[in-house]
Image (spheres, rainbow, N blue to C red):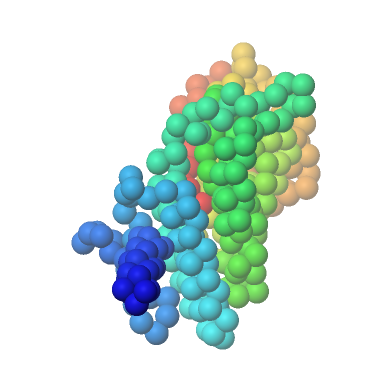
Amino acid sequence: MKKNILLICVIFMFFSCEKEKKTEILTEPTSSTSNEILISEAVVIIDTVYSESNTIEDYCIALENLKSEYLKKLNENNSKESNNELYENYKSIRNAHIKNLNFSNGDILDKFVDYYNEDVEDFVLPNDVKNIENQLKAVEIEFWYIGEGYTEMRNIPQHFLTLFKGKVTPDYEDYIKQIAHQNKELYSADAGLVAPFSEVADRVIFWENFLNNYSKSKLFQKAKMHYNNYLHDFIFGLDNTPTIEDSQIYPVFGEVHTEFIKKYPNSLATKKIKELPKLVVNNFSYEEIHEKLKLEDRIWADE
């Protein structure tokens, strides 16, 4: 009897150790390229290096642990400037895990479009995919269909705002809040605008005001990128929803331009939009308009 009890104890200890190792897969370094982030009194290593052995469950555990660590740090009455750094670090690690999730689950994402049901105008998921969806929801990740048959896993729009609202400096809070707003609805798909053109106008003026209000912000360059991108779209549209055709501006877009000029007469964007009709009528090419209005190239980055 004593031998049997001893054997059971040994087996229990073995599986307990294995379980502990499993939950630490993404919090222990596996290579010299691991990211090291200071999030407590001691240095905690959170590995963002991709490994094909990591499962969805592993990533969900890692993301939950990551959130818990940062919530503890945010509740330590740090300065808001310090919390800005926490936001940047947290976002970087979390997004790296989500990138790995997307990479390791391409087979699920490739099939996702097939679950769209025309009758209900929504996705109807089989049980196994529904279970994965529920796992992801628990750590505030969702499936996001972006058009042309492509689906990705992404943060729910409010995730970072919920954690960092009231904890960071005004420029960071305004930035995080705007990104959450922009991510609520699909902006473009199939090389065309999905968002209303008035929404493009709203984004242009938001980012222009941000640049004016926070010229010393560490987020200035990122904000400038957003401004340039939306200003570019406000002037030219996208490939399948162009604002200009046959030397004229489509009326539906021209009306929004006119409204923008009335609402924001002193905007830098207004000065450029005022010049646009003359350039279009004189049949200037895209490249020439781009140069004359001193626009910057469109460059998108993950948020």
Name above or below for residue 82 compared with residue 66: below
Viewer-proximal residue among 275 and 31: 31
The answer, for residue 144, to whether it is visible in the render is no
- Residue 40: percent from the left, percent from the top? 42, 80
Residue 265 drawn at (x, y percent): 73, 48
Residue at 52 percent across and 39 percent down: it is: 152
Q: Taking 145 as reference, is 34 above or below it?
A: below
Instruction: Evaluate whether residue 102 shows in this view.
Output: yes
**Residue at x 45% of width, y 31% of height:** 107
* Residue toward you, 292 or 201: 201
Query: 13 or 289, which lies in front?
Result: 13
Residue 147, image x, y percentages = 58, 28
Point out the image quarter for the N terminus.
Answer: bottom left
- The residue at the point 53 percent across, 55 percent down is 223
Tell me the quarter of the picture where residue 256 sits: top right
Q: For the view shown, which residue lies furthest in the front direction?
A: 1
In the current view of this chain or complex, which residue is farthest to the left? 32
**Residue at horizontal 56%, vertical 44%?**
132
The spot of residue 23 in percent (x, y) is 41, 63
**Residue 243's quadrant in the figure?**
top right
Q: Is residue 82 left or right of residue 173?
A: left
